[in-house]
Image (spheres, rainbow, N blue to C red):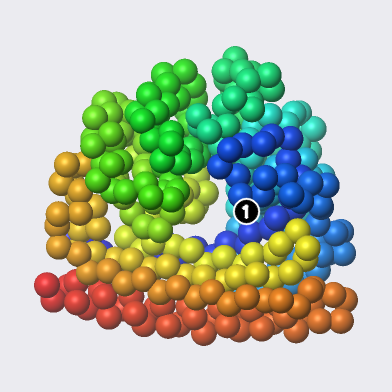
């Protein structure tokens, strides 16, 4: 019987460091509308101050998003050098921006940094001249050599659904690396369970051991064998692996400096995952999901930054108590089943 592990609850600070990007991927909701927008240094200084003041109550890690975050890599380097190995860092990137400067500046903290690279049929046409398979393999080798973690995130829209199996097999075959262990499948639009599940079940067992598939809004499937994460890397994967307790507590800072959202999702079950892909979701489950989404419309300014952040931290604290109570009730129901 699976037991709930409260340690899986994970707080994440998401920072949109820029909305600029060097690609025009078909599925991107930005569509290049906010090019050349970068987060202000004054907001970065506010973020530093509030993390130092609030500590783990605010976040255990930072996720950098965009746009293409590596276009603002000096900002990312600044924050990593400030907090060093006290936090974990996830960088969502298309992988086409040179990494050499970033590696030179951050290699001392490589074990705390995960690069999550988007790589799928929706954007490969845009990458053709900028990121060949040979260049990407070279990038993986370099990141592995310095101890960084590297993963793939593949976004599939309905029009590319028939390429899912083909693309996952290609990724597994073409790119090798000890720390290459995630290929994430996300739901976009009317991409239904019934349509996806047969494709995933047809993948070879070898591939399934390296593959975790999740919907944007919940658990889809888990490989039939345990995934062996590199020692010391487990924390970096909490964001991508929905364990006994699905986790998301995000404080989002937009490129405009505004606080946008804090949210929590929680899930637990007698056996949250089937033993095989074909037995997916057939075992009894208790689950609960709590979402919290509150918009923050006031800009972070020199005058109201502290008040806004303190409000977010206090609301997070109250919310975590609510989540803890709900999960405790789930655990009691689980034990009594």
Q: Nearer the viewer, residue 223 or 49?
A: 223
- Side of 42 relative to 184 (left or right): right
Q: Residue at x 49, y 21 (%)?
A: 175
Q: Nearer the viewer, residue 331 or 297?
A: 297
Which quadrant: the N terminus?
bottom left
Residue 15 at what x, y percent from top left? 69, 58
Confirm whether residue 121 shows in the render: yes
The quadrant holding residue 169 is top left
Q: Residue at x 48, y 38 (%)?
A: 154
Which quadrant: the C terminus?
bottom left
Disc 1 element? strand
Q: Residue at x 86, y 81 (%)?
A: 303
Q: Which residue ends up furthest to the top in the rendered image? A: 134
Compared to residue 318, the image places residue 254 above or below, namely above
Q: Residue at x 29, y 66 (%)?
A: 268
Residue 249 at what x, y percent from top left? 52, 67
Compared to residue 59, the image places residue 293 above or below, namely below
Provide the residue designation for mark 1.
63
- Side of 5 relative to 83 (left or right): left
Residue 301 at what x, y percent from top left? 85, 75
- Side of 90 relative to 288 (left or right): right
Q: Nearer the viewer, residue 31 or 300?
A: 31
Confirm whether residue 109 shows in the render: no
Q: Which residue ends up furthest to the left in the rendered image? A: 337
Compared to residue 103, the image places residue 44 above or below, namely below
Compared to residue 243, the image places residue 151 above or below, namely above
Label 1 crowd bin: few (<14), some (14–19), many (20+), radius 10 Å: many
Residue 120 at what x, y percent from top left? 51, 32
């Amino acid at each position: 019987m699976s037991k709930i592990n409260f340690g899986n609850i994970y707080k994440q600070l998401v920072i949109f460091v820029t909305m600029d990007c060097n690609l025009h991927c078909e599925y991107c909701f930005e569509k290049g509308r906010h090019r050349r927008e970068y987060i202000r240094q004054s907001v970065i200084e506010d973020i530093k101050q509030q993390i130092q003041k609030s500590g783990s109550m605010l976040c255990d890690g930072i996720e950098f998003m965009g746009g293409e975050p590596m276009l603002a890599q000096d900002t990312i380097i600044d924050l990593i050098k400030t907090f060093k190995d006290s936090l974990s860092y996830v960088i969502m990137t298309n992988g086409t921006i040179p990494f050499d400067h970033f590696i030179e500046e951050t290699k001392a903290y490589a074990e705390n940094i995960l690069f999550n690279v988007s790589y799928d049929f929706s954007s490969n046409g845009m990458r053709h001249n900028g990121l060949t398979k040979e260049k990407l393999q070279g990038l993986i080798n370099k990141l592995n050599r310095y101890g960084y973690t590297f993963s793939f995130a593949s976004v599939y829209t309905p029009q590319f659904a028939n390429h899912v199996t083909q693309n996952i097999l290609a990724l597994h075959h073409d790119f090798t690396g000890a720390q290459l262990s995630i290929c994430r499948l996300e739901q976009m639009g009317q991409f239904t369970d019934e349509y996806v599940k047969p494709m995933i079940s047809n993948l070879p067992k070898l591939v399934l051991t390296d593959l975790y598939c999740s919907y944007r809004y919940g658990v889809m499937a888990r490989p039939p064998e345990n995934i062996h994460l590199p020692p010391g890397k487990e924390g970096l994967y909490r964001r991508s692996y929905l364990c006994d307790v699905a986790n998301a507590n995000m404080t989002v800072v937009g490129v405009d400096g505004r606080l946008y959202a804090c949210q929590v999702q929680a899930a637990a079950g007698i056996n949250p995952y089937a033993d095989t892909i074909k037995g997916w979701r057939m075992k009894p489950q208790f689950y609960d999901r709590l979402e919290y989404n509150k918009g923050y419309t006031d800009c972070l300014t020199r005058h109201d930054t502290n008040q806004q952040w303190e409000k977010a931290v206090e609301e997070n604290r109250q919310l975590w108590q609510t989540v803890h109570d709900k999960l405790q009730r789930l655990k009691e129901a689980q034990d009594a089943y």
